[in-house]
Amino acid sequence: MSSVRNAEIIAIGSELLTPLRSDTNSLHITRRLNEVGIEVRRKTVVGDALDDLTDAVAGAMARADLVITMGGLGPTEDDRTREAVGRATGRSFVRSEEWVDSMKDRFARAGRSLGENNLRQADILEGAELLTNPKGTAPGQWLPGRCSILMLPGPPRELKPLFDGEGMARIAPLAAGTGRVLTRILRITGMTESHADSLVGPIYRDLVNPSVTILSSPGSIELHLRAVGEGVRTAEELIAGVEAQFREKLGERVYGTDDESLETVVARMLLAAKQTIATAESCTGGLLAGRLTEIPGSSNYFLRGFVCYTNESKVDELGVPAELIAAHGAVSADVAGSMGAGARRIAAADLGVSITGIAGPTGGSAEKPVGLVYISVADRAGVVTTENRFPGERGVVRFQATQRALDMIRMRLMEGSG
């Protein structure tokens, strides 16, 4: 077997070529391969047609040291990965009676009988090693060689433990002696992509190692730093120097790293400060409360959430004065402040956060256009309200509003005013 320096990933399934499904498995695999110094140079998404699959596997084998296929190992007629890899490698199959018995036991425990179509999941390529799948009936397969092939089932709950265990146990030793690839993501909010790039662009413009990519999504900017070193420590040092310069330029706009979401960061800060929170939402319809309670242990800081779409509900549930709404309208700084203060008072929380606005696509006017959103944070120090103009369709406006609200909570907690 050859040492492995680079890899290609093939995501298999016609559904991945539609808007209904997207591939997330390759992100996990790429991260794990980078940890041992293997660079992923290409990812291919291919449908279930046998000729297309065979061409994809053969092409990847000609270029890469390692090919990883994801999906197409199930029991149905459109699961053709085994056959495609067999054709590309010129190998036939051997049925694993041991895996047949394993499937029979699994089905019996579920009170079902093993169907004839399931038997094809026990067909193993000649020379390949069966990799036990504890979460499903489709085993993985490992075929070592000049270009080694790892075949994995598609469902993430099956793929990830199988890859992290059996897969990496075979791949990692082949990567011994190669460099290490390390990636760090800095997550930024409260500024545009162009603004962020104007600050950090002069730092990374001529860098080769680490390389830097800036990505934008609604309400958030990501800076991806990717370094290659002889070892993990060298790669970390390469990233650390550039990261420190980025943080100096961006300051408190950097809210997290790698997989950290803004709600995760806010939850950690609320717990550390022993602060509680209540929300009052109009145009976001509970989306902010949903993000805050997505975190395990959220009952330690989240007390109550109000969804008040109508003027009457704002008056009845939050105590917003009817004359305030009459004078300024439901979408206004005054009403947002009253909503936040009301949520804090009624829930007896340390912080009350409110959102009121026009998410669209209708309801806007010249004076109050679609995308106008007022957000307030009320605490014992008073009420802070911001006026925001969010671009995009309804879902994007709603998400950006919750992102801005979470960032305002973060900033208030950083100030220690809760």
Image (cartoon, helix red, strand yellow):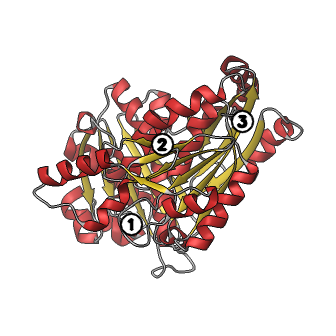
Q: Nearer the viewer, residue 92 or 37?
A: 92
Mark 1 and mark 2 residues within 8 Å of each other at the beta carbon: no
Q: Residue furthest left?
A: 111
Residue at the spot of label 2:
262
Of callouts 1 and 2, which one flags the residue occurring earlier in the amino acid sequence? 2
Is 332 drawn above or below residue 247 in the view shown? below
Of callouts 2 and 3, which one flags the residue occurring earlier in the amino acid sequence? 3
The residue at 66%/21% (across/down) is: 232
Name the element at disc 1.
loop
**Residue 334 is drawn in which quadrant?**
bottom left
Q: Residue 66: percent from the left, percent from the top?
A: 65, 43
Q: Which mark is residue 5?
A: 3
**Residue 17 is drawn in which quadrant?**
bottom right
In the drawing, does residue 129 fall left or right of residue 231?
left
Instruction: State how far apart marks 2 and 3 are (Cα).
Output: 35 Å
In the drawing, does residue 124 fall left or right of residue 199?
left
Mark 1 or mark 2, whichever is nearer to me: 2
Q: Residue 49: percent from the left, percent from the top?
A: 55, 74
Residue at the spot of label 1:
283
Of callouts 3 and 1, which one flags the residue occurring earlier in the amino acid sequence? 3
Estimate how packed mark 2 is, as few (under 14), some (14 to 19) or many (20 or more) residues with alpha carbons within 10 Å. Answer: many
Q: Amino acid at mark 2?
A: Leu
Q: Residue 156: percent from the left, percent from the top?
A: 41, 51
Q: Amino acid at mark 3?
A: Arg
The residue at 30%/49% (across/down) is: 97
Q: Residue 113: percent from the left, percent from the top?
A: 15, 61
In the drawing, does residue 314 fall left or right of residue 228?
left
Q: Amino acid at mark 1?
A: Cys
Q: Which mark is residue 156?
A: none
Residue 160 in view here: yes
